[in-house]
Amino acid sequence: MTASVDKLSVLSQNMGFFLIQLGDTLEPPDLDTLQRLTSDCREKEYREILDEGIFQNLMEILLKALEKIVQASGDSSSVLKAWLQLTAECFRCQRNACVQCTKNQSAMRNLGFIDTSVDLIKLLLGLNIAKEESCLAAVRCGLQFLGNIASGNGDSQNSIWKCAFPDLFLNCLKQEDAKVISYACMVLFACLDTWKVTELLENNEKLEVAVGAIAAYRKLPEVETEWPFLIVTDHFLKCPALVEAMYAKLSNQERITFLEITLSKISETDRAAGDDRTVLQALAEFLARCFQENCKAVLKLVSATNMDDEEALVVIRLLDVLCEMTSNNEQLQCLQSCPSLLETVVDVLRLTHLAGKQTKNIFTAAHSMSWVEEVTHPAVGFKAHLIRLIGNLCYRNKENQDKILQLDGIPLILDNCSIDDNNPFLNQWAVYAIRNLTEQNEENQAVIAQMERQGLADGSALKSMGIQVEERDGKLTLKSLKKHS
């Protein structure tokens, strides 16, 4: 500890001398003093003994850099770049001094580091050399400082939000540099809470920050997507009103991205409790409405030239999400009672099935993969997922079981009980759906039995499902096939 105190005393003297050297010089002096501070602040013991005098000196240096950059902002000379290097080193010092140190976070916030740093980052992003490495390095370090001073510190989070939202976030999220975007998302995630998420709904400019987070996820390489992913999953998905408003603003590509994030989140979510359950149900109902409103767009994929139609791709992702949601009992119950959802799913299955019979396309049953484009076609598995969703919606739900009968959906499902390379596991999902349709439902069982007698249902297909038709006392019934070892 004594050695650290002695080192701190020497550093204080050097910082004072560095400030004298700055004076009115054209270029900043050697950065060795700042670089030593940056390095020393990596040690927890050293960070904890820093005093306010060090931070006051650092603030004076930062303000001097701000002044000099303003004066040279129209210049791209080595002078401007030298002041940018000084700025970057100041930000590095600030960043390291804040790591897991509430005392330093509070001291620096009270001295105005947050406001000054935000102003400086905004200035840097507006320079004519903003895309050059010398400027980008300073911006990245400035954002890292904001992230560190906000970490675990509510007062700092509120201070950043007050001076950085929405302008700085919007500006950073629109940049091309992946690290600038990623670090801005880190700061945004650190600042967000329930109240601030609600504030995103106040006007279009603020809502654009939410849209920008989705766009950021799309632009970033996979290794940089952690922060925008967490923004969506830990904050946005917990506010159904924001999801609905944001979704209306997203492009189709951004909607696909949002749905993929949502799918990833709900796939890993166990049983939700309390308010989270209510929120997820509201989200499920909204996405079900989106599917119902746009589902017929998938028929554009009948034409091979529309294979990349973005509206159709959104429908495919919506179906994937609904299938996953209905695999969870809590979301299943609200979707089973969702007005007209089951009717819509049966209607789309009927339309795609018919389209596949009229011409050869992705909805045509294929028994040997011959089209190279079909291997990666986005609609591969679409009909199978429709049947999966039907099966889920009918699970132990007498009203929906009966509704399928009224919609004449049983023959449609049975007509899809074949091997289809365009729809992996189609037969298995059809088996699942028939089981759920007939469970404790004698009327549906009788309809299938009668179809088998009349030759309308393939007996071998029924046997592949593990059921067979038996006649007893003049009455046809379905029986499970007993497997013998």
Image: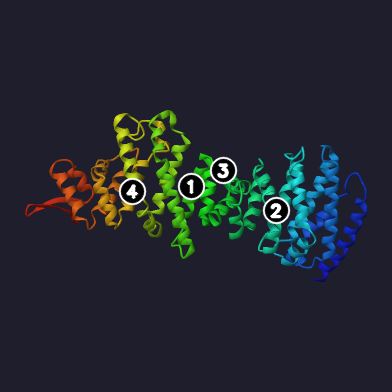
Q: Where is residue 231 shown, x and y percent of the image?
A: 58, 53
User: Marks 2 and 1, Cα distance to the nearest angstrom?
Assistant: 29 Å
Q: Which mark is residue 246?
A: none
In this figure, which residue is indicated by the disc labeled 2?
Answer: 144
Q: Quadrant of the C terminus?
A: bottom left
First-in-chain label (2 vs 1): 2
User: What residue did someone put label 3 on?
Assistant: 218
> Could you tell me which secondary element the residue under label 1 belongs to?
helix
Q: Are marks 3 and 2 in contact (CB under 8 Å)?
A: no
- Measured in 3D between alpha carbons, the distance from the residue under mark 3 to the one under mark 2, in whole angstroms, is 21 Å
Query: Circle 4 sits in a helix, a strand or a loop, which is it?
Result: helix
Of the numbered discs 1 and 3, the one sitting upstream in the chain is: 3
Residue sitting nearer the eye, 208 or 231: 208
Residue sticking out furthest to the left = 473
Query: Residue 82 at what x, y percent from top left?
Result: 83, 44
Residue drawn at the location 93% of the way across and 51% of the way down: 23
Residue at the spot 86% in from the left edge and 46% down from the top edge: 68
Q: Amino acid at mark 2?
A: Gln
Give coordinates of residue 314: x percent, y percent.
Answer: 46, 41
At numbered mark 3, what does the secondary structure look like: helix, strand or loop? helix
- Percent position (x, y) of residue 412? 26, 42
In the picture of the structure, the residue carrying the numbered disc 4 is 342
Of residues 484 and 480, the one nearer the viewer is 480
Q: Which mark is residue 259?
A: 1
